[in-house]
Image: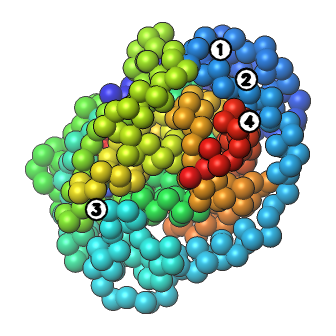
């Protein structure tokens, strides 16, 4: 469903190894012009003339109203709320290893419920994360389904996890909303972001470095071990088994270890259902989906069998917009209830380009103009720089910190403001907050 990185030369041309400049004056360099000319709805940071955008996709007219509100919103939410640090302190206390439990897998299994994978206050979470990043690996196999390279690991005590390997440096530029390989660090950031937004539907995730040679190969199944090869410098490499797995696109150890993220497998008691996302992309350039052309598309969803999940889909859109994940082609939920939240698995197609906001990821919010009040309140709380500050503090505790480059943290602050501007446009359109927040 997702493409590999486009093979244009821009990958090397536009590779930047320094954080992006913070200058408010836009630098209309070639890359940005190219972005505009693609005819998709992009907004480059600190744009001066948003009206000049040609919005090819008539389904996203609300964007002009969003941009109308943006300057005032930027002023209104320009300082950090003092409450941010209270929340961050609580979240940090939970992710600190404290020896609360000696059976971390059991604790995590008990936490996992259809409506939240962990409690709001989760003493022992630090122990579970520490176990995920240190427990001995007892078995390794090819990843379960999907297009991306991953390895399925069994950790001592029987816990299954997904290992997604590092494929890019922190500041590598990946253009295109669903281009490239999965970003292992995006999975980690997603976990912490979900707790910050109080959308606790991301499986427990942490960074971990492994030795392919000493820790994975000796416990690998035959079908996985067949995909181990030696790199040019004699280092150990792996290409795995998946739709896009290629021998010439293997991942290799760097100084005898391979960094990645470890994502906890959900317990069997939670049976996942997967449905096509109503706002999914066509994955065909210049072929628009219905939602891209029809401003009233939300009405269709409201009259479909997906209606009970609408507000959860909008929450997921907010979450995805902040990380710039535009690849939620299907969405998962736990079987049982009709109105259970989206299980936010597969967050690796995120944090590709800190300089660009693909506004269409917000389409469910722009077109439905509804949001959970709780999510709105969190966004207000995290505005004015609180988001980047909070994420930075939480991610600093991860074994593979720094998880995100500064430019990506700053981009999240900018995106919070854009969401708040969208909500103010919605308030205007729908005649008051009571018609927007639920
Ligand atoms: N932590 C998890 N717990 C339970 N099931 C999971 C978990 N992670 C992934 N899965 C299952 O495995 C499938 C593939 O995982 P994932 O979506 O991360 O792979 P992918 O290669 O990115 O797939 P795609 O290319 O289709 O996006 C998911 O659709 C889901 O059914
Ligand atoms: Mn994916």
Q: Which residue is mark 2?
A: 64
Residue 133 screen position, x and y as percent: 40, 69
397 up-or-down from 11: above or below: below
Residue beneath label 4, please?
A: 428
Q: Nearer the viewer, mark 4 or mark 2?
A: 4
In the foreground, 68 or 192:
68
Left or right: where 126 falls relative to 170: left
Tell me which label, 2 or 3, sits earlier in the chain.
Answer: 2
For marks 1 and 2, give the one nearer the viewer: 2
Q: Earlier in the sequence, mark 3 or mark 1?
A: 1
Q: Upstream in the sequence, badge 4 or badge 1? A: 1
Please tell me in which quadrant of the rendered image residue 275 appears.
top left
Q: Earlier in the sequence, mark 4 or mark 3?
A: 3
Left or right: residue 294 versus residue 165 is right
Mark toward the viewer: 3 or 1: 1
Image mark for residue 266 = 3
Residue at the farthest left position: 222
Q: Nearer the viewer, mark 2 or mark 3?
A: 2
- What residue is drawn where x is 83% and y is 20%? 49
> Any atom of ligand 1 within 8 Å of the CB at mark 3?
yes
Helix, strand or loop at label 2? It is helix
Pinpoint residue 91: horizontal percent, then vertical percent: 58, 73
């Amino acid at each position: 469903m997702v493409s590999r990185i486009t093979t244009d030369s821009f990958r090397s041309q536009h590779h930047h190894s320094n954080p992006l400049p913070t200058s408010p004056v836009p630098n209309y360099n070639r890359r940005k012009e190219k972005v505009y000319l693609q005819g998709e709805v992009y907004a480059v940071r600190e744009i001066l003339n948003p009206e000049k955008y040609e919005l090819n996709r008539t389904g996203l007219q609300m964007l002009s109203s969003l941009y109308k509100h943006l300057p005032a919103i930027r002023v209104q939410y320009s300082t950090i709320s003092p409450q941010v640090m209270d929340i961050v302190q609580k979240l940090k206390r939970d992710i600190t290893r404290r020896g609360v439990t000696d059976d971390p897998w059991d604790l995590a299994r008990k936490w996992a419920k259809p409506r939240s994978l962990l409690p709001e206050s989760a003493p022992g979470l630090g122990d579970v994360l520490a176990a995920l990043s240190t427990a001995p690996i007892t078995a390794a196999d090819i990843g379960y389904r999907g297009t991306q390279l991953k390895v399925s690991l069994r950790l001592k005590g029987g816990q299954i996890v997904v290992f997604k390997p590092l494929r890019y440096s922190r500041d590598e530029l990946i253009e295109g909303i669903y281009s490239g390989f999965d970003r292992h660090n995006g999975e980690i950031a997603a976990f912490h972001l979900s707790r910050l937004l109080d959308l606790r539907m991301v499986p427990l995730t942490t960074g971990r470095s492994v030795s392919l040679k000493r820790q994975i190969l000796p416990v690998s199944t035959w079908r996985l071990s067949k995909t181990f090869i030696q790199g040019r410098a004699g280092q150990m490499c792996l290409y795995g088994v998946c739709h896009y797995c290629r021998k010439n696109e293997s991942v290799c150890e760097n100084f005898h270890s391979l960094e990645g993220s470890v994502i906890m497998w959900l317990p069997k008691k939670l049976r996942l259902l997967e449905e096509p996302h109503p706002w999914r992309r066509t994955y065909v350039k210049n072929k628009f989906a219905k939602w891209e052309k029809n401003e009233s598309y939300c009405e269709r969803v409201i009259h479909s069998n997906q209606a009970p999940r609408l507000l959860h889909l909008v929450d997921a859109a907010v979450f995805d917009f902040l990380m710039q994940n535009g690849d939620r082609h299907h969405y998962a939920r736990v079987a049982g209830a009709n109105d259970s939240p989206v299980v936010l698995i597969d967050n690796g197609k995120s944090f590709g380009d800190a300089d660009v906001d693909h506004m269409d990821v917000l389409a469910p919010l722009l077109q439905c103009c509804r949001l959970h009040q709780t999510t709105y309140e969190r966004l207000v709380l995290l505005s004015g720089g609180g988001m980047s500050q909070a994420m930075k503090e939480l991610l600093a505790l991860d074994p593979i910190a720094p998880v995100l480059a500064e430019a990506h943290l700053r981009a999240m602050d900018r995106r919070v403001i854009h969401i708040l501007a969208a909500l103010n446009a919605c308030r205007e359109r729908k005649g008051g907050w009571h018609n927007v927040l639920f």
